[in-house]
Amino acid sequence: MGNSSGDENGSNPMKYWEIIADNLSKAGWSWGCVSAVDSEGRTIWIVDAHRDDGKRFVARANEKLTAFIELECAIRGDRQKLAVRRAASPLYSSLSCGLTSRTP
């Protein structure tokens, strides 16, 4: 039986984005992640989560973990918490992040 800290003997700890992804899966979300290089040579990360009920969220950020955090906050409806995190953290203020939500 696995745990959120990694494999059985703890030698392979999970990364934070993996914990978020695991929690999304456990909550019934299907998700995907892709990186791309923009026209200025910067890497961007795009993560997507959707459910059978038609809810879908897509987040984009300059770092993988940030994209997953944005996605998690959007799904939870924590837009106020996300705004506070962005304002308080130099990491967030230096990123160009985007978020979209679509429900049919």
Image (cartoon, grey):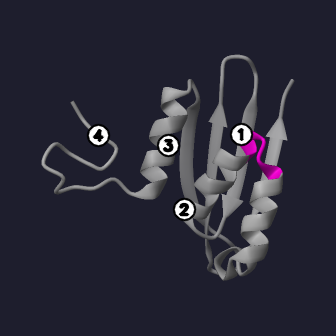
Q: Amino acid at mark 3?
A: Ala
Give the secondary structure at mark 2. helix
Q: Is residue 78 magenta?
A: yes
Q: CA distance from mark 1 to mark 2?
A: 19 Å
| Residue appearing at x 72%, y 46% in the figure | 58
Q: Nearer the viewer, mark 4 or mark 3?
A: 4
Q: Amino acid at mark 1?
A: Arg
Left or right of 59? Residue 29 is left
Q: Amino acid at mark 2?
A: Lys
Q: Position of residue 68 (x, y in %)?
A: 59, 53
Q: Nearer the viewer, mark 3 or mark 2?
A: 3
Badge 3 crowding class, 10 Å Cα cut-off, few under 14, some 14 to 19, many 20 or more, is many
Q: CA distance from mark 4 to mark 1?
A: 23 Å
- Specify the segment rendered in magenta: 74-79
What label does residue 76 carry, if any?
1
On-image quarter of the N terminus: top left
Front residue of 59/1: it is 1
Q: Amino acid at mark 4?
A: Asn
Circle nearer the N terminus (1, 2): 2
Q: Nearer the viewer, mark 1 or mark 2?
A: 1
* Residue under numbered circle 3: 21
Front residue of 59/17: it is 17
